[in-house]
């Protein structure tokens, strides 16, 4: 278990107070007030109606909360072992300086509660045929800003560069970016469990704050690990929900859709098929060439140049 000594007593007290407030509002079925405990970004990601439906599901499966006791720290998130009427599960959340919830994971059922991942067990290949550049990646906040968000921790932002730049020509045109339109390949055999398409690619330098992940595909491995690919190019996803894909098979093209200023692939491993109620996990790739050196079972980090050791061709 992670030591709490690196966290202040004040910070710990703040989390305890939020946990107590959550328990009170949840038990009173005051789901609107639970939604109001979120920060503005979380509120935009999880509308009030979705939060209400979600908490109804939790209550139906587990009942009311009897106790919430601090259990562990997972990067920026506090974990509370929560005794419901029908089960004991771990609820995780992170707070901002205003003590608003900025990340939240509540298992909806016993399977989700027991499926917290540390890393992938399935062997995986890198999702591009060509060499790519890891813009964000690693286990610390200085290497990977995703570490501040429980749902996205350990995620990668991947692009392609030449001569130190991600584009050539007009920076306001997507076609100028080397990674835009590049084929994304399946890291392993998997089933498609979620597809979002039809989101227009942004003009570089602008954001779509409504469709946060943009065009998205989520794959489920045989071991119930979930791979999320975000910011995909519009109308390039080649599979529908329920389809099976093979390792190395092209599944889509990299784009610039959603909450992003420029073309890149956001890739993360997680423990559920949900876009936001999930916990991120580490991805280790089976056999790579990293900065010119062969690496096995390797998790890329910021500023690595990465490609598969073996070529994968359709």
Image (cartoon, helix red, strand yellow):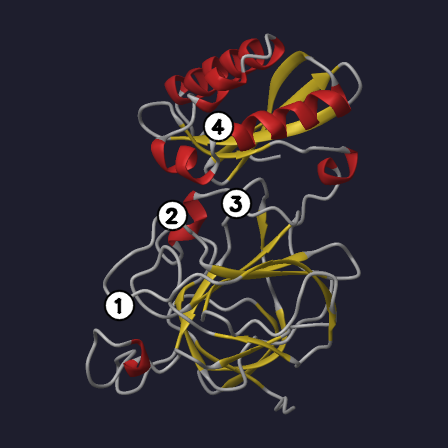
The answer to whether the residues at label 1 and label 3 have Cβ atoms under 8 Å apart is no
Can you say which quadrant of the picture contains the C terminus? bottom right
Q: Calculate the distance from the C-alpha at mark 1 to the C-alpha at mark 3.
A: 26 Å
Q: Tell me if residue 228 comes above or below residue 54 in the rendering.
A: below
The answer to whether the residues at label 4 and label 1 have Cβ atoms under 8 Å apart is no
Q: Tell me if residue 311 comes above or below residue 48 in the rendering.
A: below
Q: Using residue 305 as the reference point, say whether residue 25 is left or right of it.
A: right
Look at 32% across and 81% down and name the residue there.
Answer: 175
Residue under pointer 4: 48
The reply to whether residue 193 is visible in this rendering is yes
Q: Quadrant of residue 165?
A: bottom left
Residue under pointer 1: 204
Q: Calculate the distance from the C-alpha at mark 3 to the C-alpha at mark 2.
A: 18 Å
Label 2 crowding class (10 Å Cα cut-off): few <14, some 14-19, many 20+? few
Q: Quadrant of residue 120?
A: bottom right
As drawn, the label of residue 210 is 2
Tell me the mark number nearer the camera, choosing from 3 and 2. 2
Q: Nearer the viewer, residue 275 or 140?
A: 275
Q: Calculate the distance from the C-alpha at mark 3 to the C-alpha at mark 4.
A: 19 Å
Of callouts 4 and 1, the N-terminal one: 4
Look at 53% across and 80% down and name the residue there.
Answer: 128
Of callouts 3 and 2, the N-terminal one: 3
Q: Calculate the distance from the C-alpha at mark 1 to the C-alpha at mark 2.
A: 16 Å
């Amino acid at each position: 278990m992670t030591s709490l000594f690196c966290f202040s007593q004040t910070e710990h007290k703040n989390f305890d107070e939020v946990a107590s407030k959550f328990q009170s509002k949840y038990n009173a079925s005051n789901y609107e007030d639970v939604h109001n405990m979120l920060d503005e970004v979380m509120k935009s990601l999880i509308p009030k109606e979705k939060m209400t439906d979600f908490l109804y599901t939790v209550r139906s499966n587990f009942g009311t909360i009897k106790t919430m006791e601090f259990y562990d720290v997972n990067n920026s998130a506090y974990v509370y072992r929560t005794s419901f009427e029908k089960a004991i599960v771990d609820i995780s959340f992170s707070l901002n300086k205003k003590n608003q919830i900025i990340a939240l994971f509540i298992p909806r059922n016993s399977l989700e509660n027991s499926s917290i991942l540390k890393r992938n067990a399935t062997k995986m290949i890198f999702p591009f045929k060509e060499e790519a550049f890891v813009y964000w990646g690693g286990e610390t906040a200085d290497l990977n800003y995703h570490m501040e968000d429980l749902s996205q921790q350990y995620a990668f932002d991947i692009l392609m560069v030449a001569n130190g730049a991600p584009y050539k020509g007009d920076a306001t045109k997507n076609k100028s970016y080397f990674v835009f339109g590049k084929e994304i390949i399946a890291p392993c055999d998997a089933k498609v469990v979620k597809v979002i398409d039809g989101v227009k690619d942004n003009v570089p330098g602008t954001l779509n704050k409504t469709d946060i992940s943009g065009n998205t595909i989520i794959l489920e491995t045989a071991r119930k690990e979930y791979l999320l690919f975000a910011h995909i190019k519009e109308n390039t996803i080649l599979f529908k929900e329920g389809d099976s894909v093979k390792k190395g098979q092209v599944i889509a093209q990299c784009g610039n859709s959603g909450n992003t200023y420029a073309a890149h692939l956001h890739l993360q491993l997680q423990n559920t098929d949900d876009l936001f109620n999930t916990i991120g996990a580490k991805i280790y790739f089976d056999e790579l060439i990293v900065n010119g050196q062969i690496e096995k079972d390797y998790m890329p980090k910021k500023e690595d140049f990465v490609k598969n050791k073996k070529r994968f061709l359709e």
